Amino acid sequence: MNPNSIIPTLLATAWLLPLASFVFIVFFGPRMGRHGQRAATVATAAIIAACLLSFTALGLWLFQHPLGHAAHGDHAAAVAPLAGDWYALGSFGALTISVGYYIDALTIAMFCMVTLVASCIHVYSNGYMHGELHDVIDALAPLSNGEPMRRHGRFCRFFQCLSLFCFSMLGLVIAGNVAMVFVFWELVGICSYLLIGFWRERKSASNAANKAFITNRVGDFGMIIGLMALWASLGTFSFSEIFSQVRPAATEHRLQVPDGMIKLAKQGEVAEIVKRHSGDLDAAQKEIAAQLPDWRAQGYGYGLLMLAGLGIFCGCIGKSAQFPLHVWLPDAMEGPTPVSALIHAATMVAAGVYLVGRFYPVFTPEVLLVIATVGAITLFMAATIALTATDIKRVLAYSTVSQLGFMMLALGIGGWIAGLFHLFTHAFFKSLLFLCSGSVIHACGTNEMPQMGGLKRRMPITALTMLIGCLAIAGAGIPTVVGLSGFHSKDYIVAQDLSFWSHNPGFGGIFFFVALIGAAMTAFYMFRLWYMTFAGNPRDGYVHHHAHESPPSMTVPLLILSLMAIVAAWNIPFTSIGLDGLLHQAQPLGTAQTVTGQLVNVTMPAEHLAHAHENSLKAEWMAFAVALTGFILSTLFYGARKWNPDEVRRAFSPIYKFLLHKWWFDELYRKVFVQPALRVSDWVAAIDKKGLDVIADGLARLVEWTSRIDDWIDRVFVDDIINRLARWTYSLGISLRVLQTGNIRQYVIWITVGTVALFVLMSMYWDYAIAGI
Amino acid sequence: MPLFDSSNSQMLTWLLSLIIFLPSFGALVLCLAYRASDQSVRRFALLTTVAVLALTIWLAWPGTTPGHFTLGKPGMQNMVSHSWIPGFNIYYLLGVDGISMPLVLLTSFLSVLAMWASWPIVKHVRAYCILFLLLETGMLGVFLSLDFFLFYVFWEVMLLPMYFLIGVWGGPRREYAAIKFFLFTLVGSVLMLVAILMLYFSSDLRILSPSQLQASHVIVDQSDAARLISAGTQQHTFNILALSEMGQMSDSPFAKTMIWGQKLSLWAFLLLFIGFVIKLPSVPVHTWLPDAHVEAPTPISMILAGVLLKMGGYGVIRICYPICPDAGYSLAWLVCGLGTVSMVYGAFAALAQKDFKRLVAYSSVSHMGYVLLGIGAWSATAGLQYNSDYWSVGMNGAMFQMIAHGISSAGMFFLVGVIYDRVHHRNLDQFGGLFARMPTYGGISMVIFFAALGLPGLCGFIGEFFVVLGAWSYSKALAIIAASVVILTAGYILWTIQRVYLGPEYKGPHPEALVPMTRREIGIAAPLVAFAILFGVYPSVLFDYMKPSVQNTVNQMTTWTSDVKDAPAVTQEAK
Amino acid sequence: MNPLVAPIGLSHYLVVGSILFVCGVLCMATKRNVLGVLMGIELVLNGANLNFIAFGSPMLRADQSNSIGLDGQMIALFVIVLAAAEAAVALAIALNYYHTHATVDVDQANELKG
């Protein structure tokens, strides 16, 4: 069979399996076994099947498109992605919004990563969520009488949401156009909302869920603007069509402002031309087409292209928790730990990075610079906050934010492969770290590291796997020889930074140093976490006493993931098949060349330049050195306890407070955005009640008053006239009564007199003309 | 004599009339059945609405056989025409096209659900059912009539039952709410009447060509055309199709100058627009809506939000734009501006509400703003080389938004009603924990509220997204403001969900009354949920109906822009 | 032309009729006795009758061809019949009145005055 049709079918099946599981659990969940226990089996089976299908697709893909040697520069014979549409959501004239697919090596790699991590987490959740199999007493959701709340377990609901999430996430990855990405973007958001708020009785959980969704919506607002800018100028959302318009083959896939954007920017002149050729649209279009090169040279439409890029990136800022919208991610740790591992570490938050990677061909160097800056700020800020956090999951959450910053930074300075490489390795080790922390929390019943300590004897497997995770994220390895997955990916990023610095002497150094400092801090806070949790003496006897190693359903996924955390960056032995090659193959056409900005003097060096021998060697050693520094410092403070962290804390008390309060972002946003919004809404409600309603009621009252006045006029004037008339008539009658004597003779006389008078009058005035004769 | 579409003379002429008047026939039967028990009265009324729904589905069923709806045909179908008041050229003219068909379906569908939701009403059941059925006749008549006079009659027919339904069966401040509703709508309809008469007296059928006359169903054959065209005096008409033809002519009779140097078409547009926008409703004439909703009984709220508001949008799309394209072009900023302001204003107002039903009412204001924005975004200009596609996206989105809002807002009002029936209060701060108490209710609410939030995969998203996409080509600023509403919408919906459904326990009075949903209630909510999902996942179901007609309207406007509006002065002088 | 010397024509009848009429009226106006008043009425009626007959007579009419001939006389007959009936009723009333009030003075009969 033709792989071009098999691969989409395989991936679509993998995509739809979790949906089927979701629908099934929605309707039959509670009736599946005791408390819906079987729901977990259904969901897990679905995702494992999806995983197998994805890897089959990967195999097929590799079979069809064997990985060449990492092609450097622009490869003309790039692998064409498989793209197509399943059905149209709406189609209007030349415009269509459809549900389709766009499959290249990146898509397949993402599928494998997502389904693999999700499978592990599903298995893990079977053990972790067993508390939900029976009635739950939730002390964190107190009733008004102070007692903890009791409720039924929601085991199957958890898996139902997980399945929905897997479906949405895979849909996001397979999407063939940006609109579809947006659709699933929102859907993963709502899954995240549902799962953060899984313990919906807890106020903190529902607050965090709301915060996550609304903050993401702020990013989505920007994304909609980007979508509109693209749609109005290019008339399509499809990846392949956008890319072919932005980087046409005719210009060797160099970025150029597409015709549609120029026309939109020169709308006034277009209108004039069209009006001049009244009725002859073809002639007008010919004239416009003739003008286009001039207009393009003058830079028209470039702003629109930047706007489109920035808008799309806004969405990524929200989803990937980048500065300034990072505030939701640490709060999202209110959700169950497997959720944090799957959604808020490995997959959903990485979707922003994925989209930046996917949409890379559209970003101008200026936009890339913005991306890099945002990434750098995020990476630094989050790392500093992680230094002081004591909640084990929050440390990991800030670490995630920081690592996502690394990826954005890498992408922003031209390191497409570096950024996405880190995405994959990070997914494995960060989900591993989260699952380990879940195992610890499961055992200790608390999130606070100061209550832990010395757990490594009680939980040897967890301690070991977590150590592997820490080593991987810190980038442990032997330079030039071998290293854990994080070692390789971080190495790529630092190398790219170095290359960027050499192309942009001056400000380019900032990114480089930020990355190095970030790497050092990463090593520091990760080992701080490990030491505080597993090493040393138990700090809380009760916690330590009750701690125990988790069941195999939880430890087996840990082992699988720690294996991946070690080897994810390696090629399959004796072949050149590996993530690195896959990403090289996936690199979008035209993005592997050095580019310079039009508006800002910035150069994004081509990625292969970073792999030049001396550059990468320098980078490897430097990265190794800073990671080692971080590790040593951490060991001195927390492992060997040579130095006392409290003294440092006291010495730098203002900074410590600043970091402990997470740079005051929450407070700032509450003051600057939330409260004003609520105040405006109060105003608006007041305008309605006291303004518009008063006007409407006032008008009604005005009418009422008018009618009162009318009534008064009626009574006083109109009625009076009528009454007076009646009175006159009456008195006339009274005065005429005297004639009514009852005396017949008198009457006869009157008759006579009257008749005579009539005759006299007639004789005097009668004229035939009166009768009309 | 009935007039038939010459191309399809086998059409069932009675079908549309039957659909409109079956409910009033049911009402008549109920008038006579003064001995019937309350329950049987309810059942009979429900049966009547179901019969109407069945007929509507028969009508909408795609097919080329008589009485079915031909998909892909832009013009009017199943037309019925009888001379009604010949002295004034008033016809009993009915017809259905892609714009009205979904709305007719929505009306009869929601009528069934609302009637079924009327079970808890125990006061004067027979009178209630009679008024309800009369209301249905009015609503269907508005969507199906093509003669302006007939349209106006149905518009008013619908008003009065609504007044009584709110004023008699409503909440504590029902008299105030009913009067407010009545007066607002009446002001609108009076302005509309003025506009109708303005258009009527300046219309002249003689300037239309025979084919145009035939297309608008004014005449049957060519001999009539000759008679009409050679008539000595002006031939006025109320025929909406004929008026549209006249309005789009290059020497339109409505282009004559009136007050303050503005054209007649502008004034007519404004008057009609005010009338429709009150119904829609848009800021600043929306204040009747929260009061009417809060006081109206649940089923009436469903009808009010689900159907009555749509008449505003329908009027704008069917009447304002085709008849007065000139004014629509120059006042597009007003239409879009009002839409955007409504969206933002409604969302902010919803954020501040403490009453559950008031919140939903304000969300309606916000959502209906999209409809105005989508319709008004006149982007098919010379600058876009008369590319009508973007406007078509916006207008289709607006039409879709009307249906989607019909589903989601009716659902939300029903859900508020379900909880109000149990605990008899609507204070948002006194709920909480309902998810645990009533799991099915919680699940259904999630879907409906997320549909209102515009979550992809549910019906609300498609309309909003398409409208915003269409608006960008008209005005970037408005589109950006409109897009920002997604944040506010998420804010008030999620906050509501948090206060009502989440949390450890229920905080208000009558906690013992919180029993799970009954079968009847699930039966009402389930179709709404199903359609919310269906329209969200496969919107083509609706687009297949509306697209040809909407596209036709847009194309007419575009042709008008390029051939009349932007026609060089030379050609006009040559004429 | 002097009527006294002219041949008997319409105007002579009219003069006699009007004299009768005036006598009747005067009689009605001056008499207090019911019977007198009744007599006056008869005189008035007869005066009118004379007019009818005069106008109705074919000999006295200028446009004879248009007349059927007997209309005036027929009306006079009606009047006579009516007068007889009226006289009968009036006399009955007067008689009854006399029985109850022992007088026929019309000025005394003011009990129905309203």
Image (tube, coloured by chain):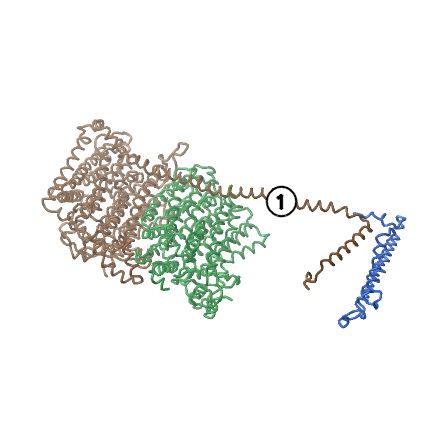
Outermost residue toward the left in this view: A614
Q: Amino acid at mark 1?
A: Asp
Question: What is the display colour for chain B?
Answer: green
Spot occupied by residue B249 in the image (x, y as percentages of width and height): 40, 61
Relative to A529, is B368 above or below?
Answer: below
Depth check: B348 or A166 in front?
B348
Q: Which chain is blue?
A: C
Question: Residue A684 falls in which quadrant of the image?
Answer: top left
Q: Chain of mark 1?
A: A
Q: Secondary structure at mark 1?
A: helix
From where the camera sits, is residue A600 visible? yes
Classify the position of the N terminus of chain A by image quarter.
bottom left
Mark 1 residue crowding within 10 angstroms, few (<14) / some (14–19) / many (20+) = few
Q: Is residue B434 left or right of residue A168?
A: right
Q: Disc 1 marks which residue?
A: A719
Classify the position of the C terminus of chain A by image quarter.
bottom right
Q: Which chain is brown?
A: A
Q: Is residue A383 left or right of residue B565?
A: left
Outermost residue toward the bottom in this view: C65
Spot occupied by residue B444 in the image (x, y as percentages of width and height): 40, 47
Say how many tags the image has: 1
Relative to B116, is C52 above or below?
Answer: below
Q: Is residue A236 left or right of residue B81?
A: left
Depth check: A721 or A442 in front?
A721
Relative to A709, is B237 above or below?
Answer: below
